[in-house]
Amino acid sequence: MIQANRLSDPTVRAFVTAVNAGDQQAFQALLAPGATMSDDGSDRDIADWSEREIFSSGGRMDVESEADGGRSLIVDYRNDTWGAMRTAWRFEVTGDGRVSRFETGQA
């Protein structure tokens, strides 16, 4: 496992840290205006999805590996709803260091 504070990309590092801390305010601050996301190939509303899949269900990311300069992760993701699952995450980051899109799904 890679500790969150050792992830290569600072924006992705902050994203993982916010998720693992259950810090919804920090998570939202990382999102660029109009940010989008998908889960298993289907676009989702970030606010609804993150509340359900992360914050109200105790979501946690344990990073197994990273690629693409730290913007692609393989993660052991778990929450109280679904339990543990191996997932892939890919991030698009703006020039000012905010997430404009992330995609997740089964790895």
Image (spheres, rainbow, N blue to C red):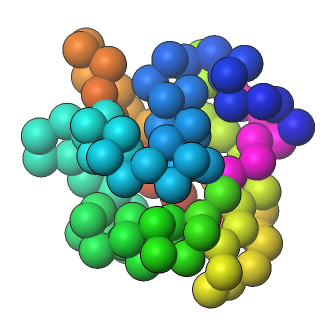
- Check the image and name the residue furthest to the bottom: 81
What count of labels does the image hold? Answer: 0
Residue 8 sits in quarter: top right
Q: Is residue 94 magenta?
A: no
Question: Magenta stretch: dominant SS?
Answer: strand
Residue 36 x %, y %: 25, 53
Q: Which residue is drawn at 44% across and 24% down?
A: 11
Residue 40 vs residue 28, the one in the foreground: 28
Magenta range is 61-67
Q: Quadrant of the C terminus?
A: bottom right
Does 3 appear above or below 46? above
Query: Is 30 placed left or right of 104 in the picture?
Result: left
Q: Residue at x 26, y 37 (%)?
A: 29
Q: Residue at x 66, y 81 (%)?
A: 80
Does 66 appear above or below 8? below
- Please indicate, yes or no, whether residue 90 appears anywhere in the rendered image: no
Residue 106 vs residue 58, the one in the foreground: 58
Does 21 appear above or below 41? above
Residue 26 sits in quarter: top left
